[in-house]
Amino acid sequence: MRPGITLDDVTRAADLLLEKGDRPTIEGVRTMLGTGSPNTVNAHLKTYFQNLPARLNLPAPIATAAAELYDKIRSTALDEASEERKALEMEIAAERDALADDRRTFESEKADLRAAVASLTADIDRQKEHQRTLSAKLATAERELATQATRAAAAEAQARAAEDERERTTQRHAAELQRQREQAEGNERHLLARVDEHKTALQRSQTEREREATSAAKRVGELEQSLAETLKAHASTQAELARSQRDAAKRQEAVAAAEAALQRAQEQSTKTLATHKAESDRTRTELESLQSSLDQYRKDRDEAVREAAKLEGKLSALQGQLTEAKAEIRRLQTAK
């Protein structure tokens, strides 16, 4: 109730209602005033209706009727106030029930919140512990990372040194391989030239031996022809032996000389053939030695090629190790 609601306020409001042709009721007055409790308005309305006949100078019957009208209005107002009070009490009871439900809900939510707060507190404690563990692990990881970075720097330096050494070794091996290849090619050309020379010499020697053998055979034929003629002459001399002993002796000497010449020719031919055979054997032996040297050279060349292949394999392995070292360095740098 607004403080200051007086009988004058209720009187003015009731008069206005009467002027409008409305019956002054508790709710009507409260509506006109915009405030006021029903009990206060009811008390002032009772005084208003008691004073109304005197204010209007009404006769006694009219005043009595007015009093009765007031009683009816008052009774009606009381009934309305009672209904409003019941409705208000029911509303208050409903609000109390709602408040009780809200309180129970609040208590439940408060308990849930307390449990959630306890759980959150435990989670926070666990998080703090986890954070401390992570901080320790982070410090350890940072130390390990620093160690790994130092090792990576050393590995990178070693890799660079190994790469430089590998490049120098590769260059040396490449130069040595080129030199060996050039030397092998030169040796091969030299040996092939010598083989060709020996083949030419052998062919020339064989040609000369064939020519000398032909010449010796020709001389033997000539000697044989000469022998035949000598024998023929000797036969003639034998026929004439009776006539001249002296001619026979001469012819005998001629025969002996021819036989000696034939023997010498045969011996010379035998020696020549033996010499050519020995030279042919020496040439064949030398050719076989050259062929053996060529085979050995080819073996050495194949061995050099295999060694070069092994070196290239080692070089590829070193390159793979260098690539892995670089990848590990990049991974460590990325992790950092």
Image: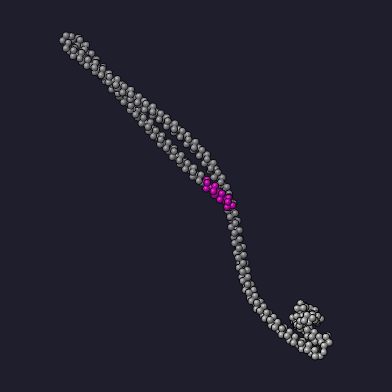
Q: Is residue 268 visible?
A: no
| Number of residue marks | 0
Residue at the image position 67 percent from the left and 81 percent from the top: 90
User: Residue 81 in the image: x percent, y percent?
Assistant: 72, 83
Position of 266 with respect to 39 (left or right) is left
User: Residue 25 in the image: x percent, y percent?
Assistant: 75, 82
Label the magenta part by its dominant secondary structure.
helix
Residue at the image position 59 percent from the left and 52 percent from the top: 336
Q: Which of 233/27 is in front?
A: 27
Say if 188 sits above or below 220 in the image.
below
Residue at the image position 52 percent from the left and 40 percent from the top: 167
Position of 111 with respect to 246 (left or right) is right
Q: Is residue 291 visible?
A: yes
User: Residue 146 in the image: x percent, y percent?
Assistant: 59, 51
In the image as oriented, which residue stretches furthest toward the bottom? Answer: 61
Q: Which of 286/235 is in front?
A: 235
Please state the extent of the stretch shown in magenta in the rendering: 322-336
User: Residue 250 in the image: x percent, y percent?
Assistant: 22, 11
In the image as oriented, which residue stretches furthest toward the left? Answer: 242
State the quadrant of the N terminus: bottom right
Please say whether residue 94 is one of the residues in the magenta stretch: no
Rendered image quadrant of residue 201:
top left
